[in-house]
């Protein structure tokens, strides 16, 4: 994997997506600072210089888009396991946030682009909070978590550990799909068995007990009307 580091950019995901048609090998793009970080559905990922890790990894899937639905969740497993090993235990919130003590520590945004030969370039974008100043938390508008001891770690070692975990995960995912990650995801599930509501553009769509994910990464919800399976479109999960 070619590693590139830039002092500042708008969004590492946007940069790699724009370059995807010309890419021939995996690239890891690290930005010391991101000024227009992106979340799902046009939301933003906010950070301040020196207070977070923001990077994206471009990876090619020869088989195209088929079977990639669970990839963001598998990335969550890789990130959570690495952060857990280096720092403190963390949990996963469906579909793909990493929580520490119930607050968001890291975000994942996977975007894809199909190449001329039918392969898919997936751009895996990750933001991890190292330090969370009050002013940044105010801008985010909800409480957020950070891992200050990671900020004191050697940055190259930290990135190498994260990249190892991701590369291993991407290779395993390419071979076996999300089924290789279901059990690991469910062990890390922050809200297993807890009452949750599923919001679709702010409207409550389902209420029930969160029962983990199935082998394609869909959320299982036990509602009064029985079990429903939820596809990660633009829906949001909240505790009740
Ligand atoms: P939802 O929680 O509704 O499912 P999401 O978790 O999928 O949304 P993302 O699109 O992954 O949201 O991330 C964007 C959201 O994350 C923002 O709308 C904001 O609430 C929150 N956010 C932005 N920057 C940070 C940050 N540095 N740390 C923690 N949370 C952040």
Image (cartoon, rainbow, N blue to C red):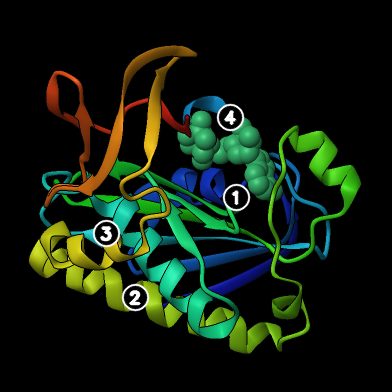
User: Which residue is rendered at x = 39% and y = 78% of the image?
Assistant: 165
**Residue 17 seen in the figure:** yes
Ligand 1 contact, mark 1 (Cβ < 8 Å): yes
Ligand 1 contact, mark 4 (Cβ < 8 Å): yes
- First in sequence: mark 4 vs mark 1: 4
Tell me the SS state at disc 2. helix
Instruction: Decide: few, some or many residues near mark 1? Use Cα within 10 Å; few <14, some 14-19, many ≥20.
Output: many
Left or right: where does residue 128 sit relative to residue 194? right
Residue 195 image-quadrant placement: top left
Residue 159 image-quadrant placement: bottom right
Q: Is residue 44 above or below residue 83?
A: above
Residue topped by disc 1:
104
Residue topped by disc 4:
43
Residue topped by disc 2:
167
Residue 175 image-quadrant placement: bottom left
Residue 34: x percent and y percent? 72, 50
Left or right: where does residue 133 sit relative to residue 148? right
- First in sequence: mark 1 vs mark 3: 1
User: Which residue is rendered at x = 11% and y = 52% of the image?
Assistant: 215
Left or right: where does residue 146 sit relative to residue 180? right
User: Which residue is rendered at x = 12% and y = 48% of the image?
Assistant: 67
Along the line of sight, the residue nearer the viewer: 137 or 43: 137
Residue topped by disc 3:
186
Along the line of sight, the residue nearer the viewer: 158 or 99: 99
Ligand 1 contact, mark 3 (Cβ < 8 Å): no
Instruction: Decide: few, some or many residues near mark 4? Use Cα within 10 Å; few <14, some 14-19, many ≥20.
Output: few
Along the line of sight, the residue nearer the viewer: 53 or 23: 53
């Amino acid at each position: 994997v070619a590693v590139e580091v830039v002092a500042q950019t708008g969004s590492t995901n946007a940069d790699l997506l724009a370059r995807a048609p010309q890419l021939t090998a995996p690239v890891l793009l690290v930005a010391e600072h991101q000024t227009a970080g992106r979340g799902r559905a046009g939301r933003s990922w906010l950070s301040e210089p020196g207070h977070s890790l923001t990077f994206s990894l471009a990876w090619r899937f020869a088989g195209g888009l088929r079977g990639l639905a669970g990839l963001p969740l598998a990335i969550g497993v890789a990130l959570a396991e690495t952060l857990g090993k280096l720092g403190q235990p963390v949990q996963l919130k469906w579909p793909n946030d990493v929580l520490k003590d119930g607050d968001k520590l890291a975000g994942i945004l996977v975007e894809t682009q199909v190449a001329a030969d039918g392969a898919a370039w997936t751009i895996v974008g990750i933001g991890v909070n190292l330090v969370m100043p009050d002013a940044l938390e105010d801008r985010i508008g909800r409480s957020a978590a950070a891992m200050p001891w990671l900020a004191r770690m050697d940055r190259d070692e930290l990135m190498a550990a994260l990249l190892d975990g991701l590369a291993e995960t991407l290779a395993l995912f390419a071979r076996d799909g999300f089924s290789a990650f279901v059990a690991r995801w469910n062990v890390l599930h922050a809200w297993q068995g807890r009452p949750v509501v599923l919001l679709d553009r702010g409207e409550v769509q389902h209420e029930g007990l969160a029962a983990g994910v199935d082998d394609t990464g869909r959320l299982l919800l036990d509602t009064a009307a029985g079990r429903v399976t939820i596809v990660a479109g633009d829906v949001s999960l909240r505790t009740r």
